[in-house]
Amino acid sequence: MNKFNIENFIKVLKNTYPDATCSLDFKTPFQLVVAVMLSAQCTDERINQTTPELFKRCKTIQDFIDIDLKELEKIIYPCGFYKNKAKNIKLCANQILKNFNGVVPNTMNELLTLAGIGRKSANVILLEVFGIANGIAVDTHAKRISNRIGLSSESNPEKIEQDLLKIIPKEYLKDVNHLFVWHGRKTCNSRKPLCKNCSVKEYCNYYNSKSSN
Ligand code: SF4
């Protein structure tokens, strides 16, 4: 896709989903860190149902360090992979307190030192907490849409991110992070994409290859 087309593609998506934002509920930076850690293999809806009890029980980073592991596991059980997630949440809280004076760091390299935080999660934290959009959080939606549209033929999220960063102008990175998630949830579903109603079908390799058969 050339520069003209990619800008139009993004503008069409923006018109389609004018309210696209992060759908995880949080009030403090560390609450978002916890929410993104819970988000592996879990829906935002389920996370938002689980975190009110958790954030009521743990109001500070110290509370996450102090809470008994078993109690934490029980609270976050509905989000799946609760043992691993609970262990990482406690470890991450410890690291932030010890290594960053209790303040969630605001650089990719620092965030990547935290337990349970990979590039995708770090991109979400940088964008939603600090308003920094230097990268793209390539989750399952961004991966699927990038492959179907033809923005990247890679399967590795980091390689897809690099492909996207080469073609998407920086001023659109913030929007794109939200738009891919919304488009993936509402239209470009993994099993049954709603191609006929899709506002960006004219840009899509998947759609065009099917309709030419
Ligand atoms: S045309 Fe279909 S496959 Fe292509 S982006 Fe739209 S919904 Fe997804």
Image (tube, rainbow, N blue to C red):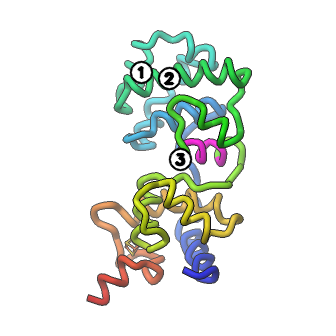
Q: Amino acid at mark 1?
A: Ile
Coordinates of residue 84 in the picture (x, y in percent):
40, 26
Does residue 159 sit above or below 67 in this rendering?
below
Q: Is the C terminus in the top left, top right, bottom left or bottom right quadrant?
A: bottom left
The percent coordinates of residue 6 (x first, y second) are 58, 76
Distance from the alpha carbon under mark 2 to that under mark 3: 23 Å
Whichever of labels 3 and 1 marks the residue nearer the N terminus, that label is 1
- Residue 135: give x, y in percent of width and height: 62, 55
Magenta stretch contains residue 125: yes
Q: Between disc 2 and disc 1, whose residue precedes?
A: 2
State the residue position of label 1.
Answer: 75
Query: At 45% across and 39% down in the image, what residue appears?
Result: 39
Boundaries of the magenta span? 121-127
CB within 8 Å, label 3 to label 1: no
- The amino acid type of the residue labelled 3 equals Lys
The crowding category of the residue bearing disc 1, from other C-alpha atoms within 10 Å (few below 14, some 14 to 19, many at least 20), is some
Q: Residue at x 46, y 66 (%)?
A: 146
Q: Residues within 10 Å of mark 2 (few under 14, many from 20)?
A: some
Contact (CB < 8 A) between labels 2 and 1? Answer: yes
The residue wearing badge 3 is 120
Q: Would you say residue 20 sits in the magenta stretch?
A: no
The reply to whether the C-beta atoms of the residues labelled 2 and 3 are less than 8 Å apart is: no
Give the distance between the C-alpha atoms of the residues marked 3 and 1, in whole angstroms: 24 Å
Q: Is residue 20 visible?
A: no
Residue type highlighted by circle 2:
Leu
Which residue is more in the foreground, 45 or 1? 1
Is residue 48 or residue 91 the one in the foreground? 91
Q: Which residue is mark 2?
A: 54
**Residue 3 in view (yes/no):** yes
* Quadrant of the image occupied by residue 86: top left
